[in-house]
Image (cartoon, rainbow, N blue to C red):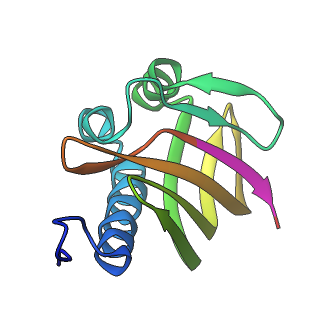
Amino acid sequence: MTNDTGNYEPSDAAAAIKKANADLNRWMVQGRTDRLEELLDDGFVLVHITGYVQSKAEWLAQIDSGEMTYHGIREQSVKVEVHGDTAVLVARNLVDATIWGSRATWPLEMTTPFAKQEGRWRPTRSRAITY
């Protein structure tokens, strides 16, 4: 829903961002790097729990190669703060994945800034920490 200035209300933006995050999680599990490529900002980077900063291209290539396989993601909580055409999503998930040969279920808190670009909310970065 838009307000009288034509801008999205924060609740509508929050719903769109939560949907984009759910799509991100689903496509990670499905290995749909084509869909992830479309969703993520061109300059997207992923910061792993180790502190390793990984480019979008490298991350998607490792999903394609099977070096990173996401078996399941169970959402525990999601919070969104919207500030105009930017927002920050903080999600807590239980992530069952095989990462570089090690399979585990990690309790991950993902902090993901989003930017509204051409009418779509796109993740620009994501940082993982354990909780």
Task: Please say if 48 is above or below 65.
Answer: below
**Whole-percent x, y for residue 38 in the image:** 25, 35
Residue interval drawn in magenta: 126-130
If the image is split into quadrants, where does the N terminus sit? bottom left
Q: Position of residue 105 (x, y in %)?
A: 70, 62
Residue drawn where x is 31% and y is 32% of the image: 37
- Looking at this view, is 131 or 68 the one in front? 131
Figure check: 83 above or below 126: below
- 116 left or right of 82? left
Is 123 displayed left or right of 48 in the figure?
left
Residue 43: within the magenta?
no
- Residue at x 82% of width, y 68% of height: 131
User: Where residue 127 appears, x then y in whole percent?
Assistant: 68, 45
The residue lying at 52 percent from left, 27 percent from top is 59
In depth, the one of 28 and 4 nearer the eye is 4
* Relative horizontal placement of residue 99, taking residue 23 as reference (left or right): right
Q: Is residue 78 left or right of residue 13?
A: right
Q: Quadrant of residue 45?
A: top right
Work out whether 119 lies above or below 74.
Answer: above
Membership of 129 in magenta stretch: yes
Magenta portion: prevailing SS class = strand
What is the x, y in percent for residue 109?
A: 70, 62
Nearer the observer, 104 or 58: 58
Count of marks, rendered view = 0
